[in-house]
Image: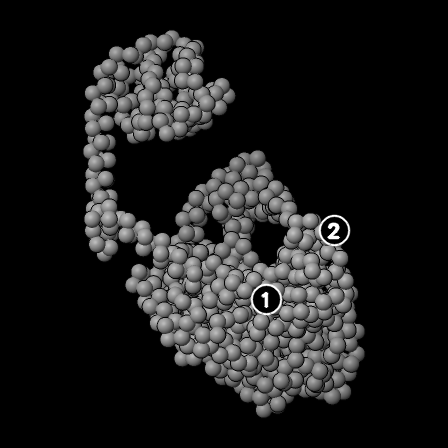
């Protein structure tokens, strides 16, 4: 069977056995700070196992995209050098949410492998957690596996947890014996040995606990089953291969590398084979990460993606000098894997653009970094230091942008190590030096239990409601009411501007937060002292009645911008194509900011087209609709979801502009598009490679901008005696005339300076052993100063020191020092630069024959006198 057939057969088996087939979630976990990337099939079911969320089904099966290249589960450094480690893989899994447990899970796994996939039962082994007698007895008594083929292992091998905290439990794993020729040679070799004889195929986690931050294990409210079987390893066994790279998942990519480089994979030595492996694996992970909305950056997920691409670029050089090699491999992967994950084709241009740009930038850094690395290596070996020091590795990283993992690879290739501990100490020092101590509101958030606030902000901007919770602090208080119209920042929309009044005393709302359950939260308002200026502290008590009031004008302007944001995304999809994906947004009463994935700046005609589409829909005054449905139904309808948001799968809120836009959103929106008034994009900038940022305005802000711009154009028209449509042409013409005039002035000034050269030359006098010339000029450019020195040098070689005053800044005094070849050995400009810095705080630098710089509040006469004395002493 090929990988496509194996994947389908797995899902079909569990569908026949009553499981709901759930699509793979994004590789970017939604609102889960404990994870960099989805790294297991159960990630998307975490809240179900925790009891925070319910689904319409109690059993499920998935083929989940996974990346393990950062955080707790990090296989990056091993990829390429082993037959099984990958950064990207697909996890086939079946799940039970308080339905079946250990017995049924083990039976499902055994039956699928032996009856559907025809595994040889004589080559199958099982492991259980050393304290899990229940699972051990199921394998022995129910399945009939002999005790010699059941191993009890410790926590390291058979106790699974998703992260440092969260759902966890004992495991039972299934292994296949690949034969003694693959083993270590020991007669007692069995699963758990580090050799390659036994391959783990299936891991069944019996979710019984929730690991707390203090390390304790709290029983889960319900027991569940989380299983995982790597598709790549399954293909190795089913296709009779020795390595994942020999399966049909990788062979098309390997063949593309062979075709592009002319090198044979089978004939390659171990180092070259590792390069084949790295390119094939990293093309898979980087392409899918970009398709799911990740972009290379210097922190978090983006930094891990950058490391993957850079590592691929480094290994690519072992196969070919052609920088496009890795991109070609990615193209092959996109073509081959699109039937499984169509988002690859949708985002192909973006993927190729990001990969190409990253590789080009990294290659430029690499040349410089490798030269410096070679210098460090030679220096250390001369001192009998057989490693790259932590300080050297940090300087390569911090000063030259050279990744630590590349330094480690180069060190390994040259038989050296890197002092990683010292490197990490340097990193820690830098973080401590740059850290700005900020006290966040979250540090003092109140702890609440069993409180739910009814949000009525969709219907009204004010209400009176009983206070159900009070937490007084030194300078502020947290207040929770039974009902509230206050919108808490979410989905890009900022907090409402609001006040809270109790017993005729009004307090400003300083902050708003959601506490407790994600889908049914308590909404807490942080209030300060009374608005009346008396400095009165809050004496609000539980059961007081609070008048909650939202600033209605700010809210309606925010509403305009939020609905316009939805319309903007719909228009971008029409104009730029389906690859556009939201990468963030901010919506307030002044403007909307929309970040999205796109590989190039928008053309003026594209911006105009987007604006026209949005304004046309505004003129139509389309009534917006809000419906509630399930997440699966919303996805089936093609309704847009933002990958960074966490949605309740059983109930999502959909905001529709019929015939134009439909998005999942919990924000406040205009009842009809006409309320927006007008829409104008005011800027389009690059946020990062492959990510653009649009800023736009609506309503009163747009009107004010139109009025201001109209008045400006009108005044310019009157000034130029031109029609409004002719103003730009007149401004262009005036600008060209100005440039021509400035050019003529520069030429005249240059000629004037040249005419003064003979006069300057006559001022040259010998001081000590050196012909010295000191001059004072005003507003000369650096090029003009150098021209003067070069012209004088032709007739009278020597040492020239020119002071240059800035007429725009009378406190500023610049200088240029120049030596002709005849005196360069006598006059050290490097020493002069040090002298000027120490005596006059005039900073400068340059070459052995020319330095330039300046300082403030320096007296020109004193500097000239000092230069004369300094020269006399040479």
Instruction: Give how far apart the Cα atoms at labels 1 and 2 are.
Output: 25 Å
Residue 376 seen in the figure: yes
Question: Which residue lies most toward the front here?
Answer: 504
Q: Identify the residue position indicated by label 2 in the image.
A: 474
- The mark total stands at 2
Whole-percent x, y for residue 456 in the image: 61, 73
- Image: 749 above or below 566: above
Displayed quadrant of residue 737: top left
Q: Say which residue appears at 31% left-offset and 29% top-offset.
A: 781
Q: Say which residue appears at 43% left-offset and 18% top-offset.
A: 859
Of the numbered discs in the image, which one, if any, rests on residue 487? 1
Q: Nearer the viewer, residue 823 or 522?
A: 522
Q: What is the quadrant of the C terminus in the image? A: top left
- Image: 774 above or below 203: above
Q: Is residue 390 left or right of residue 621?
A: right
For label 1, the SS is: loop
Whole-percent x, y for residue 115 in the image: 60, 89
Q: Say which residue appears at 66% left-offset and 49% top-offset.
A: 533
Q: Residues within 10 Å of mark 2 (few under 14, many from 20)?
A: few
Q: Say which residue appears at 59% left-offset and 64% top-offset.
A: 550
Whole-percent x, y for residue 431 in the image: 61, 46
Nearer the N terminus, badge 1 or badge 2?
A: 2
Residue 246 seen in the figure: no
Q: Nearer the viewer, residue 388 or 240?
A: 388
Q: Is residue 749 left or right of residue 687?
A: left
């Amino acid at each position: 069977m090929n990988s496509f057939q194996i994947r389908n057969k797995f899902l079909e088996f569990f569908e026949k056995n009553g499981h709901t087939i759930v699509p793979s979630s994004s590789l970017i976990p939604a609102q889960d700070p404990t994870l960099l990337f989805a790294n297991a099939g159960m990630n998307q079911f975490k809240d179900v196992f925790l009891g925070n969320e319910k689904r319409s089904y109690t059993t499920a099966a998935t083929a989940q995209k996974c990346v393990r290249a950062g955080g707790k589960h990090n296989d990056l450094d091993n990829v390429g050098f082993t037959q099984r480690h990958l950064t990207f893989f697909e996890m086939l899994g079946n799940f039970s949410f308080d339905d079946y447990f250990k017995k049924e899970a083990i039976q499902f796994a055994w039956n699928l492998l032996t009856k559907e996939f025809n595994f040889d039962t004589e080559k199958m082994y099982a492991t259980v957690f050393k304290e899990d007698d229940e699972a051990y007895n199921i394998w022995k008594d129910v399945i009939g596996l002999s005790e010699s083929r059941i191993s009890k292992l410790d926590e390291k091998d058979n106790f699974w947890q998703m992260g440092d905290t969260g759902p966890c439990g004992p495991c039972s794993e299934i292994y296949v014996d690949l034969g003694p020729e693959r083993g270590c040679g020991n007669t007692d070799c069995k699963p758990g040995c580090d050799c390659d004889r036994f391959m783990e195929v299936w891991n069944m986690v019996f979710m019984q606990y929730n690991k707390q931050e203090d390390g304790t294990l709290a029983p889960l409210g319900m027991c569940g089953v989380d299983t995982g079987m790597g598709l790549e390893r399954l293909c190795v066994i089913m296709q009779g291969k020795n390595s994942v790279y020999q399966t049909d998942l990788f062979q098309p990519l390997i063949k593309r590398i062979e075709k592009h480089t002319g090198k044979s994979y089978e004939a390659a030595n171990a180092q070259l084979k590792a390069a084949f492996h790295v390119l094939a694996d990293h093309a898979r992970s980087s392409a899918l990460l970009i398709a799911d909305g990740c972009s290379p950056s210097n922190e978090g997920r983006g930094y891990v993606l950058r490391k993957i691409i850079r590592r691929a670029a480094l290994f690519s050089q072992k196969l070919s000098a052609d920088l496009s090699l890795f991109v070609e491999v990615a193209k092959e992967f996109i073509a081959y894997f699109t039937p499984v994950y169509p988002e690859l084709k949708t985002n192909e241009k973006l993927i190729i653009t990001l990969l190409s740009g990253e590789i080009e930038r990294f290659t430029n850094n690499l040349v410089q970094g490798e030269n410096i690395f070679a210098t460090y290596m030679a220096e250390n070996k001369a001192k009998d230091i057989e490693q790259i020091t932590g300080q050297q590795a940090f300087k390569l990283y911090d000063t030259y942008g050279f990744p630590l993992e590349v330094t480690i690879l180069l060190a390994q290739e040259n038989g050296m190590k890197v002092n990683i501990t010292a490197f990490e100490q340097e990193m820690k020092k830098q973080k401590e030096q740059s850290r700005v101590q900020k006290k966040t509101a979250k540090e003092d958030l109140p702890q609440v239990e069993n409180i739910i606030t009814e949000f009525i902000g969709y219907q009204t901007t004010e209400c009176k409601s009983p206070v159900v919770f009070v937490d007084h602090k030194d300078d502020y208080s947290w207040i929770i009411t039974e009902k509230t119209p206050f919108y808490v920042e979410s989905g890009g929309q900022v907090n409402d501007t609001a006040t809270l009044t109790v017993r005729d005393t009004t307090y400003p709302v300083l902050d708003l937060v959601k506490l407790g359950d994600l889908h049914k939260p308590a909404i807490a308002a942080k209030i300060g002292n009374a608005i009346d200026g008396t400095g009165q502290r809050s004496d609000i008590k539980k059961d007081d009645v609070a008048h909650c009031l939202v600033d209605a004008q700010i809210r309606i302007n925010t509403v305009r911008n939020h609905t316009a944001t939805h319309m903007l995304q719909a228009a971008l999809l029409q104009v730029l194509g389906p690859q556009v994906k939201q990468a963030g947004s901010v919506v307030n009463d002044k403007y909307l900011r929309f970040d999205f994935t796109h590989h190039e700046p928008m053309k003026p005609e594209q911006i105009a087209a987007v604006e026209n589409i949005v304004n046309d829909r505004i003129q139509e005054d389309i009534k917006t609709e809000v419906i509630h449905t399930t997440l699966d139904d919303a996805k089936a309808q093609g309704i847009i979801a933002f990958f960074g948001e966490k949605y309740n799968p059983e109930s999502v809120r959909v905001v529709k502009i019929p015939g134009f836009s439909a998005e999942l959103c919990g924000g406040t929106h205009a009842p009809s598009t006409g309320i927006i008034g007008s829409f104008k994009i005011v800027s389009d900038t690059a946020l990062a490679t492959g990510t653009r940022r649009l800023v736009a305005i609506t309503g009163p802000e747009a009107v004010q901008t139109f009025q201001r711009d109209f008045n400006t154009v009108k005044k310019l028209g009157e000034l130029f005696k031109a029609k409004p449509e002719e103003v730009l042409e007149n401004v262009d013409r005036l600008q060209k005339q100005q440039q021509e005039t400035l050019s003529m002035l520069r030429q005249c000034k240059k000629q004037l300076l040249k005419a003064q050269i003979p006069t300057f030359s006559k001022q040259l006098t010998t001081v000590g052993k050196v012909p010295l010339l000191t001059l004072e000029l005003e507003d000369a450019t650096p090029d003009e100063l150098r021209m003067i020195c070069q012209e004088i040098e032709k007739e009278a070689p020597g040492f020239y020191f020119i002071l240059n005053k800035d007429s725009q800044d009378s406190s500023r005094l610049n200088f240029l020092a120049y030596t002709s070849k005849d005196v360069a050995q006598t006059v050290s400009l490097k020493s002069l630069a040090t002298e000027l810095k120490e005596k006059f705080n005039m900073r400068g630098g340059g070459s052995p024959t020319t330095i330039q710089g300046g300082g403030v509040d320096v007296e020109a006469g004193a500097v000239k006198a000092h230069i004369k004395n300094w020269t006399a002493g040479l």
